[in-house]
Amino acid sequence: MSDSEDDISSSGSVTEAEDLEEDIDMEELDVTELENIHSDDEGLETEETDKKREKHFCKEIWQLKKLPYSAELEEQANRHFIMIKKGLAESVLLNDAATGFCHWTMELDKYIDFYGRRFSKEEHIQLIRLFLPLVKKGAIFRNVKIAMRTLYTLLCKKDFLTRQDLVIEWRPLMELYVEVTFKNLEEDGLFLMPDGFRSDLHTLIFYARPYFSDNSVQELLDEVRPFMCIWDESCLRYWKLLDLFLCTAMPVEKQLTHGSGLWLDEAWYWYDEITNNSLFETQAIKMFARLSVECPGHIDWTDKLDLIFTRLLRALRLGHVTGLCQIFNQEYGSIWLVFMMGTKAHERLMSHLRDLFSQVESFLHPSNNGLHTQHIMVLLSKLLSNTLLRLKRERSEKSQGRSRTLPLIPEEMRLTQDHLNELVNMMLPSLKLIAFTKTCKELVSPAFRSACLLCPKIILPVVLDMVYPALETLVEPHRLLQTLGTLLGVLIPLVKDEPDAEGKTYRTHVITILNSLLPGLDCNDISKCMVTYQIIGVIVNMIPIVDCSEAVHVRCDLTEDEKELCSATANFDSIISMIMDRMFDMLVAVGQTASTTSTHGSIAAKTGNNIEDQIFHRGTLSVFKGICRNSSTELFTIAINKLYSLACEHIFDSRIANDVIGDMIQVACKFHPDIAFQKFFKLVISKLQGCITPEFYTEEKVEFGILWWISIASRMIKIHPKLLLENWHMVETLMDLVMPLKKCTVATEKALNVLDNVLDQLTSIQINSLVERRKMYDMSTEQFLAIRHWAAPVEKKHWNPEWIIPTEESIDRATQLLRKWLVPTIDALNAPTGMKKKELLHHLYLIRSALLGSCFSLPLLEGKIIPLTDSHIINPEEEMVTIVKPKGTPEISIDGKNVRNIILDCTIDLIDWLLEHRPDDVKSIQEAVAILKSLPLNRGYTKELYNTSSTSYRVTKTMLCDKLAGNRSNIEMIVEEYVMLLHRKRVAHTQGWHYNENHKRLQDKLLKVATSTYSENRSKAQSILLSKLREHPYSYKLIVNDILAFLEPGNDVTHEQLKGALYLLIDGKKQSLMLRMEFEQQAKMWPALVRVQHSEKPSIIALLETAQNMIVDNYESYRLKYEWEPKNVEAAWKLLKAADENSPLHNAQMLRGPSEETLAKYKNLLTEKYEKSKSNYFSLIEQLFVLANNATLHWRPLDMAYSMLSMQVRRDCPLPDNVVKMFVRLLINDTVKTRRIASAVVASWLKMTKPKAVKREYVIPYKAPNTSTGAKHPIPYGFRSDNRIMMYEEEKLPKTDEEWDSFQFCCKQNWGAYTWPKKLRTYAPLKEQTAIDRTYEEFSDVEKYIVDTFQDEKFITRFRELFSIEMKKEDELFNAVNFSLFQGLFRCYGEVLTQVFRTQLEILLTSGKEYEQKLAAEMTAGLMNGSKLWKYEKQRRLWNWLDPLLTKTFEVMKEDGLRNWGVSIATVCGCSEARMLKPLLDLLFKLVERPTDNAYAASSRMFLIQSALCQFEWRGVELWNKLVGMMKGSLVQPFANLRDRVAISLVSATWYDLPAVAVDPSLPKHLHPPRISEITDLYKDLLGTCWDEVRMVRDVDITNGSTGNASGSTSLSVPNGETITHSASSASLAEVSEVKKQARLTLRAVISFVFNTCNQSYDAYPPSFIQLLPLWCHYSNDVGDEELQKTCSALCITQMEAIFIPLQHAPEVIRQFQQILSSQCWWKAKVAALKMIRMLVFSNRFVFRIHRDDIGMILVNSLNDNQIEVRERASDALSTLLQSKFFETTPELVTKFSTAAHSKDLVQAHGGIMGLSAIILASPYSVPEFLPGVLMTICRFATDKNATIREAVKRTLSEFKRTHQDSWREHEQQFNEDQLMVLRDLLISPNYYV
């Protein structure tokens, strides 16, 4: 298998949420690829050429046409793809499945990375068909993982292929997905998957799904519906498979018959039905969202919006709700909502969104910061960003007429600007509030950016209104920082702002802001400085900095807005001047502090810059680049003069100051060489001539002034080579000054940078910026008006960048420099004897600088090619080196010799000399090794540099791009950078197959250094050698024997050599040599690691431990046998013929395919390779086995050998018998780790070699209608007559052994609960399981050995003792591996081992020790599960002795053993069905029936039976009924633990009671599920005195007005009845009767039952619980029993107040509250009820909206209650609901409360005041129009005679002041002067001061 797979990126797939975004975003489908820059709809050539090329290519990267070698590149691309097709096809046809196929697969990946989809549609299809057959069940190997990655690369870009072009079979993908997701292959030790295999498969399915066939939906439903048992975890399988495999990308006309019409109603039913504890809500939302995206407008969601928004609202976690909340995935949910806009549901959707944002608005206020803030901000951000992506898709579809993978968004559904304005306007108040949030600040700017792109005319004035005040303030720096961040987000829309209807834009603000921002450049506040740099950088890069003020006078075509903008540009000269001054002030400040503080490094420092320096450097350079790039010559001259003045006046001993000034000079010279170069070059030369004296070359330390100018020179020299050549005499003067040999190392390094950069400029290809633009900027305003070119996009048809390409002259000059400086250095190093260390080091520095500077034009190393593989599909001679220059570009040679070869010879000889004579010269050796790193393949740009540039490009593009307009709007700078990146990507790419003898020499020398004496040398050489081995696939084979020689114990090796060799083998984690995918190499390396001479040195021990851990953590089961499917072969032949004859990708000669002779020659190659791999596999095992049994080895290598052997367990190739025997012996090894390894290996081996159980079809006598394949919703689920055969019925159980042996069981609990599968296969009856019923004589030799070993008394006794030793805390839990071991023993060997284990069990079960009980539980579980397929006679014999043992154990069981026994029983019952375990169930039920006075004993027995019955789920309903019947008489228990256990057991029993569950009336009563209402009624009958205490009038007629204000009118009249007090005084509570005590115990039991039901039930609020509301309201305030009060209060807070109310239950809930609040009950109960109403209505707003009037009556009537606390709580509730806009504040409401406030009746007057207070406090952060009048009304009562009213007014005004004082300046504008005077008098007067 190819180790070159290691080159594959290890990054995982993108998340599915990102993928959904990709579904929306049709232009930038994969944000991780740079390829997304290309726009899909724009062509470079004429239409005729486009059409011709379109036939041949799916899509080309147009920027490649702009490269200077585009013709050569196209020629190479054509040949490359032809070779790929040939290589892939012949790999299949000639059976090179490992090396060849993987190599050409990666070549295809490289081709797509370099050229995009530059192949025809037919070739695209055949490539997919070539790879798809590899992805199938059982193929869990790395080559399949590579194929999957290539497949999703081919599929990920939509619209190249449509559903008509390609159909992908879904079933093979699903079978593989089920195998790797739902089968515990790794957990069971059967197979080790490649890392990331599951996620890659998931990603492949995601991209393949749109191409599934029309029939796939029905086929999938038939396949997965049988798993939809709502009570079984298999329902998750149903939802995951549906979510992943459901094809929703069908056209609308097929959706009803083949798509959503088959599944949507069913999915919605479950989404709606399961109102609590849903396991699949996220999957359902993803499916609905995907349907909305992939088939937009097809579904009308109008009638479903109430439920959607109720769940969304509750998921926001508002109001400190701590109880049960919905899981509403905002990522997918927001996409779902966004794609409802414009549909039939639009109006209602907008109404709901408006209500939602009204409700959440006040929660976003900074003073209300909390968990909810983050949820709301994420929702806002996601809604806006997904709307933006949808709008982009719409515009993309509108502008392009080509075919699409997904259906188009219908015309009538498309978003208009009115739609967008409506959405943004309703979000605007919330957006304003989050601008200054303290939470998730990173979400603010993107949210504003999305909103501004959607509606710039709405958002821009808002942001500008925030910016200007923030810039003026000095006391709120955080507001300024956050405002600037927000401004940064909207800069692009601001710069590109279009005129409105009146012709106005906001563009003039750009210049104003640019001027106002300058104070933000402050080195004392780095955060502010960074954001300011970013803003200025974006502005100066997006707009031409040209003075257009003349245009006002000379042009007559300007609008008023343009005139204003032109006038504003007159300030550019002063702005540029001030920007430069500000940046230079900071530079001087930084430079001056460098010498006095340690914050900034000196000019000679080698440490990295700190973050502040990096921000300062990048920010200054970005701004200055923008000024140079985008300014006219006149304005540029201002900047350059200031730079020149600074350069003349200042030098600092500061590296950062030096870097910044040097880079600024370089930028100036690059963009305006005619103005800047001569000026600065002469300055630098004159300065250097003035300060360089003869002492400069002899001093050990050079003063910083010289270093300053040399460093400036090295940067400034990076300019157009034409200028260098024109001023060559000055260049030579500079070189002669700085290049001679020096003693100062820092000066040498700085000087060599000059050489490096001069050579680089002379020999490399670069792009020359601003050739045309500069001319335009200097034109008159009549010819070119710059303000009309702000953010001007590139016109790609007319954009032709100028390239700088090496010429003969530049190459000659470069060669001249090498002759002058490099050749003498090499000559000197060829005779190093007597040379000083520093001199030698400086020579090496020069060689490396010369090499790095000129390497682009140096030919690669020459030499005889060495083949790296024996593959007949790979020819190293034909492998292409990536073209990076035009044909004929001159290259450098010295006297006709290859410069790289010269340097290699010199360096290798020097390393030999140094290692022999100066092994301690670490610096020189490291420098020589560094030269070897760059020498072979470096062409001037490395992969590391490319990755850095790529990241930088992405950041720049993110800041400067318009996400809505897409790539068409990219400015020239972005496109220019991208084209350079394309070039650099090619330069950085290395071709590793061109491996010659010089590469081998180089690697050998690196190995010598990697195993040398000094660790610094070793470390550097090791990392370089390993990188070289990765660059050249399979080259490690040529060196591995040399490495292993250091590990052989007999060889005389030093400690350092051993360490070096070990590092080479283990370094690299998954890419380490010892994990290469060839058993032949592993058979060399792994035994060598074990044989390493034992050392007590900690470093060696640590390395060997690392090696062992790395193998255990990263090893995977490598492929032994490769095979091709017929479809692979068919696709291979078709791929060869796929190209059109006229296509440039067609070559009849190369693509003719292999001859018959060749086919015959390699026909059996796969079989031969399989036999060879298998031989090497067994060779590896044999060597490890011999070592593992070597008694002379230390325990550490033995442990390593055991671990290595354990990794070789695999399901497709059995372990040798001797290895299995060894691991059986190791079960009683003294070390815990070894025993654990042995247990896992033996358990896995038993699982793989167990006798195959017979399975056959389960005949279902009768299937109810609509319950099989093809079923349509609604499907009856639950307890039906046809699935009765699956249920436990004692009376129908077999009676005799023969009947038991003939009975067919069905172990999976899900079968039959929903639909039946097409064919149900289960275990055949016991009598047919003959393979399992074996005798000792029928066992194989190894099986006999295992049996004999376990029957050995010493072994089994030792085994029991060791496995029950007390260990760590985590080892106290039930061990699944031990269980699997015991199960395997009894499953494989029947009852042969029963007697020996019986003896041990008897000892364990009678023990009271925790660990012995744990082992007993594991052993018993294994015994019961392993024996389930024995003949019934044997099972009966087993239970005859096991039953009394377990009974006795369970009777006296201690608490520490209970959990393990519970897990044990649950494990057994989860693997079987109830009827198979009748003996166990009989035992458990007898235990429960047995009387006991011990509450713990009774509780533990109930726990055990519950553990069993929960596993049988709905099929054990008879058993549940039996248990409920047994508990009916003991519902109320004095002991809390027993009481709670009874309640929890009842909850489990009633779990199957769902509102719509089907219960066939014909079924007997004992097969009906226990109902929650029945249990509630049982409890209610025992609650008599509790109801008496509540004093609830149950039969109140709410409509007859018999209780005063209960008539339902909204009047505030006083009730006629007398004031009622609490019936039970504290004195009476002290003498609670026995009856009351029992009733209260019952109440505690009810609370436990209700609490646990709410935590576990799928029904959020069972109707029978609603009737208990009065109890909760009363007892949450109980004064007689503090514990009861706390429990009841906790129930109210965590459950009742937070619970989801289904729509159908809302009327009954309201009726209960009406009863409580209108009856003569305790006032505290009413307070609790009002508190509950407040939260219930708030969190279920969309459920209760149709009951708004009823709730209003309740609250208004409660304001008239006699008790003041009730009125206050009613006011709070009313205020909350007014604030959330559940109620509207109408003039009628204000009038009603005002009238009531003036009433002479004190209660009514106070109620009126509280109503007015509710209205005032409902606006805590704003002043609505009506509020001043209400405030004035309530102020009149501030001096009322009644103290209660005065206090209410005082509290209201105090709260009003508290919430409004922060923004009082803004709020006070809503009041007139008289009103303000009143408020001041009340709020500040001495008698009222708070």
Image (tube, rainbow, N blue to C red):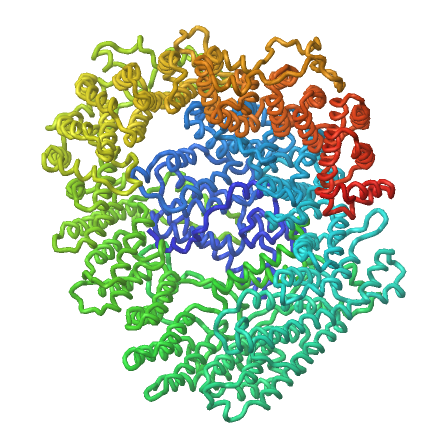
Residue 349 appears in the picture as rendered:
no
Q: Position of residue 15 (x, y in %)?
A: 51, 43
Residue 1236 appears in the picture as rendered:
yes
- Residue at the spot x=45%, y=64% of the render? 881
Q: Where, by quadrant of the figure, is residue 1560 drawn?
A: top left
Q: Is residue 892 left or right of residue 574?
A: left
As drawn, which residue projects farthest toward the bottom?
Answer: 694
Q: Position of residue 1442 (x, y in %)?
A: 19, 22
Q: Which residue is nearer to you in this view: 1311 or 822? A: 1311
Q: Where, by quadrant of the figure, is residue 1398 drawn?
A: top left
- Residue at the spot x=72%, y=39% of the render? 1854
Q: Position of residue 674 (x, y in %)?
A: 69, 78
Q: Is residue 572 left or right of residue 1505?
A: right
User: Against 674, is 786 above or below?
Assistant: above
User: Against 1803, is 441 above or below?
Assistant: below
Q: Is residue 285 left or right of residue 1086?
A: right
Q: Position of residue 1257 (x, y in %)?
A: 33, 19
Q: Which residue is nearer to you in this view: 373 or 634? A: 373
Q: Which residue is nearer to you in this view: 1337 or 301? A: 301
User: Against 422, is 464 above or below?
Assistant: below
Number of dots carrying numbers: 0
Q: Quadrant of the C terminus?
A: top right
Q: Is residue 395 left or right of residue 1258?
A: right
- Residue at the spot x=59%, y=32% of the render? 314
